[in-house]
Amino acid sequence: MLIGIDVGGTFTDGVVLAGTQVVATAKQPTNNADLKGTIIEVLDRLLEGRDCRDVQRVVLSTTLVTNMLATGTGPATALLLMPGPGLPVDCYDLFPHTWFLKGSVDFRGRVIEPLDATEVEAAAAQIMAEGIEKAAIVSKFSNRNSQLERQVRDIVQHSQPSLELALGSDVAGQLNFRRRLVTTYYSVMTQAVWTGFVQEITAALVARGIKAEVDILKADGGTMPLTHSIFRPCETVFSGPAASTMGAVALTSHPRNSVIVDVGGTTSDISLLIDGEPLYASKGAQIQGHYTHIKAFSVRSLPLGGDSPISIHEGRLTVELTRRDNAACFGGPEPTVTDAFNQLYSLEIGQPERSRQALAKLEPQAGMGLDSLCREVVNLVISQLQAAITDMFQEWENEPAYRVWEVVHGRKFDFQEIVGIGAAAEAIIPVLAEKMQVACTIPAFAPVANALGACVARPTLTVKIHIDTQSGYWVMDQEGRRGEVKTGAKMQLGEALDLAQRNLQQLALERNMDAYADQAEVFLQEQFNVIRGWSTSGKIFDIGVQIAPGLIKEYQGVKQ
């Protein structure tokens, strides 16, 4: 048995998949103050009457880190930065509690300015004096040489041992100093809370006799072991939209150009499939307006869902942005978007008479009949969704995969269908598709598609290696790993590719995802000669290999 649990803003959904059969589902209101409790309650409902020893895999998708960052409730965090020469330091003054230190590394990984240990000690003392308990240490080009970051760490640990620290080279080893400092900052901010969550979930699973593999869904639609996520908590942001995208991939077997709209109770998430493959955000996930090194799908969340309340303000009909309760047809106290669609299109959702009664209370204030009122709500909702999709296409046009499709096909990109998933999709998406004059697909199990997407998503792993044979080293963008190579110009591209593949396989083995290592693909291979005088004195290679997102080997589709 495979179990998937997705924590949404309104409901937490769960599924149990056995072969090609969904043998159990569960839906529970999400308690954002106790996400662990909500997850365990859903898990217990899924396991009722089943032998825990038959569980082979559990995958979770949670909003814990997303909520913490979106609400600004994370603890105060300091930044110790070594930007070196180049742009003014103001360009990196993105967060409060930022200290700029001496010391710099060049693009080849050479230390060109040493640290000032006294300056580091003074900064650490001031951080503690301000009551801050976490700090991110980031140097420009630390992905080529992490020496200065580690020296700062050692000095701080000696003078202020209680400070919780994270290094940019360990958290995000790609080029782009600004994105690396943002990623490291958010990672150390969320790490303690996430670690506590992981420990609680692990203990709860052990108490229930579950010994299966437990994974967490990442923003890129792949999974990683829950225990390893302690070191990379920010990779779990936006796992909800990733779950909806992977759910659509799992439930729609035909590769088409499709817009996915996940209509939940609180929000609607929009993403894109190109020939059946999810489109990525080439600049990485964006958190509070800052780009990061977190690989993620290109998605947009719209504050509009099936439970969005309908109200009248100064005689004007309004669809509010904040969910307060269930739709009236499901026992809620006031009319919502779902109720308007339910009434206008005779959908027979829940208790239709309750929809009619709740909406009828607005007629006197609205100054219009019931049908006109519902039609106005529908027009507002469809207009907002259509505008959001149109805006997203303007963003998508700048993504490399989107442009490549247009070059290959020699025409402007178009999409054939809207795939609707989520609890309110059946009510809203057919109307939206008709308005946009495209096909509409509401797959089976659409209300729990997110949980299913998490359940069958396979592990992902991306490794980039920079090799400099003149300087005699290689460095990987994961965990600051590095090693030595023979100096000179004799290394060939094939040897560089082999080095990258070996490192990916080793990392996959350590993270218990080696079953997919043989499916790793090369997505980057660049080679440059280093010329000194009139001869080649070395080579520089940049190699990227990945276990790309997809579905687990065991997944053979779902039968109704």
Image (tube, helix red, strand yellow):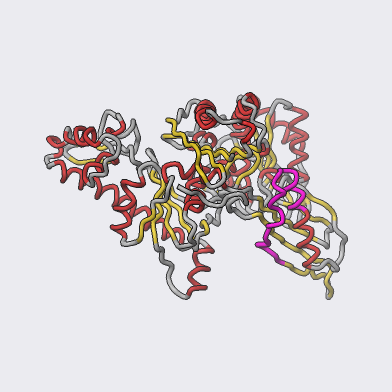
Q: Does residue 380 appear in this view? A: yes
Near-viewer residue (548 or 309): 548
Q: Is residue 525 magenta?
A: yes
304 over 550 or under it: above or below:
above
Q: Residue at x 80, y 70 (%)?
A: 531
188 over 549 or under it: above or below:
above
* Residue 490 rendering spot, x and y as whole percentages: 86, 68
* Residue 355 rendering spot, x and y as whole percentages: 23, 36
Near-viewer residue (453 or 186): 453
Report the side of 489 relative to 91 (left or right): right
Q: Does residue 94 appear in this view? A: no
Q: Quadrant of residue 498?
A: bottom right
Q: Which residues are magenta?
A: 503-526
Q: Quadrant of residue 327?
A: top left
Report the side of 226 relative to 341 (left or right): right
* Residue 233 rendering spot, x and y as whole percentages: 61, 38
* Residue 123 rendering spot, x and y as whole percentages: 68, 33
Report the side of 307 relative to 87 (left or right): left
